[in-house]
Image (cartoon, coloured by chain):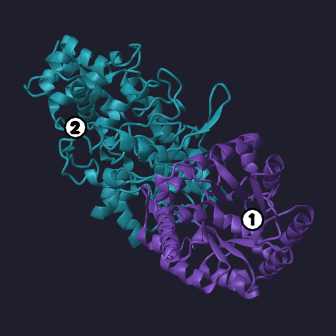
Chain colours: A cyan, B purple
Amino acid sequence: MMLFRVWLALLLTVTACRAQAVEPPVFDATQLRLIRSFGPWPPAFHPDTGNPLSGRPSAVLLGAALFGEPRLSKDGGIACQSCHQPQQGWSDGQARSRGLERLDRNAPGLLDSRLQRWFGWDGASDSLWAAAIRPILDPREMGGSVVATATLLRGDPVLACLAGHAADGAQLAQNDEELLVLAARALAAFQETLVSPRTAFDDFRDAVLAGDRDAMARYPASAQRGLALFTGRGQCATCHSGPAFSNGEFHDTGLPFFITDADGVRRVDPGRHRGIARLKENPFNRLGRYNADPGSAAVIPVRHVVQQHRNWGEFKVPTLRSLLFTAPYMHDGSKPDLESVVRHYSELDEDRLHSDGEAILRPLRLDRQEIDDLLAFLGSLSASLDAPAADYAARRADARRLCP
Amino acid sequence: MIRHSLSAIAMLSAVIAAIIAAIIAAVPAAAQPAILPLIDAHVHYSHDAWQMVPTEDAIAILRRAGLRKVLVSSSSDDGTQKLYQAAPDLIVPELRPYRSRGEIGSWMRDETVLQHIEARLAKYKYVGIGEFHVYGADADLPVLKRVVALARQHKLFLHAHSDADAVERLFRHDPQALILWAHSGFDRPDAVRVMLRRHPALWADLAFRNDHAAQGQVDPAWRALFEEFPDRFMVGTDTFTPERWFYIEEHAKWSRGWLANLPRPLAEKIAWRNAEALFARTGFRPVD
């Protein structure tokens, strides 16, 4: 965390020094509307009606305990937090994560994931709890099983006690699959509590809305110019929209998506195209028997989404909050730092985009000042993650107290 | 009396045979066991694909997809020639005007492109010139007029990624031109219908489109268009990035899925017969 503070201070200082010759921008009406749409932060909590444990404090404790539980994996050595570490923005700092094997993708940060509609880089899950099942059962990730998870939940006195509390006094399910779903729902209930802290940008956004010029002036001019680029010529806000800075959908941003295996075999990661197929065949999707609210509007997208040619090589638009902690970037971790991400969009290879596809994307041809400004703005979307990490530790301690 | 009876029996037999033939023709392709051959009429093998998908791997992908022929154009044309040399029985080469990627937006104003085209036409065999990108009044630029003239001179079709306006202009340069309209212009069915009615020598590929079929079902507006113009449509993948080569098999499977929703004779036309018929209108003779 200390390193983060030093980094952020340096970034803001450097960009502020460069900014001395340039005044803060004047935002037009469209930009002001966009700035307003990036908040308020933190957002209000709305439980997932498809998950009966969503928002239930006792389930959060079970979820926190399970999140750090390596016995969910086949070899007893990999927990959720192995790839989603609190100090790394709930990712792992690896380009491509390693479970029981080297995986194809970068571990996404989990902060603010409750604001998403699809989960995973390919959106193969349509709820946070279904997304929690996938790595447990994936033979390359944790390699667990329905039976092993259920056996653990029944057999371990602490977990059984926590599960009992999570079930709110109801008798624990006897069916293995139902116990797996209970574990997944508790993991989701815990992950719903992972929220990025307020940032310098949030203070600026609220000051803009309040017309508080003094407070606005505390936001560095370079970050303001970066915000102007973000909401203006860069058109970044077209996809990185809303309080979580993501439209929650999938795009081809001209990034290669080949994977070369250790034995030299080359293949592709089809991204959203295969994600839709996996979503449709997933028995835990919102069309399945475990959805507690089959009448909700959340069912509509999974019922109607269909594979399209453009989905080949599309990946989900990630949130930009707490971005400084989740390097390396992109679905395959191919960009080591934020500047290389910004340069990707600045020097975009248009030939990799279909001429009738992602028409929104054009090379931005940013100069050095503009790159620094965008970096300053992006940096201002992060703040110390000490609090969420401490919350996680506190919840695990609470769980131990509740069920020693 | 006997002669009358025999004649009646013969007539009855003919009627029954005609009914059976009609029934067979109307049976959806899904009921027919044989895998539907396909001609993929929209494949690129551009320079960034050569290393990532070596020629032998590319040919293997095309064969695995069960393709009868593949219409290939590349930036640069060397990619097409690599494939053609490796599998002349499979590859149908067309000449893309682009010497490398990155000329999509500028080639029509660059007259040195013409030297490139003429040199390649003198050296290699092609079925068409394209796929090239041109929109609106740019189709009246001198480079385009010369390209149209070269196509006529060499008995080639033009494969145009264009709006309807540009296609109209190309036909004005040569009313006898043969044009394959890439992506059916990404136009709506009613707009495509207008163009097909107006131009009997216009064909349309369905590459990178999804609106004509979803979940194996053909959209009613598109079905009506296919039925009105059974001889004009063809399928294609569009491998505009190297990674898209790994989509060819998936696309072939998808194409067979929705084509199975059509009567077999119509499905076969869109799957491969129309492309073959277009190739036969040119001076190019595919290798069997």
In this orientation, does residue A16 appear? no
Q: Residue at x 72, y 88 (%)?
A: B172
Residue A157 location (% of width, % of height): 18, 11
Badge 1 amino acid: Glu
Residue B57 location (% of width, % of height): 72, 40
Q: Secondary structure at mark 1?
A: loop
Q: Nearer the viewer, mark 2 or mark 1?
A: 2
Q: Residue at x 37, y 26 (%)?
A: A137
Residue B226 location (% of width, % of height): 52, 71
In the drawing, what numbered circle is on residue A290? 2
Question: Residue B38, located in which quarter of the rendered image?
Answer: bottom right
Most extreme residue toward the front, as rendered? Answer: B1
Question: Residue A322, located in which quarter of the rendered image?
Answer: top left
Q: Residues within 10 Å of mark 1 (few under 14, many from 20)?
A: some
Report whether A273 appears left or right of A244: right
Residue A16 in the image: above or below residue A54: below
In the drawing, what numbered circle is on residue B16? none
Q: Chain of mark 1?
A: B
Residue B230 in the image: above or below residue B86: below
Question: Residue B76, located in which quarter of the rendered image?
Answer: bottom right
Report whether A53 appears left or right of B205: left
In the drawing, what numbered circle is on residue B103? 1
Q: Residue at x 15, y 17 (%)?
A: A161
Badge 2 amino acid: Tyr
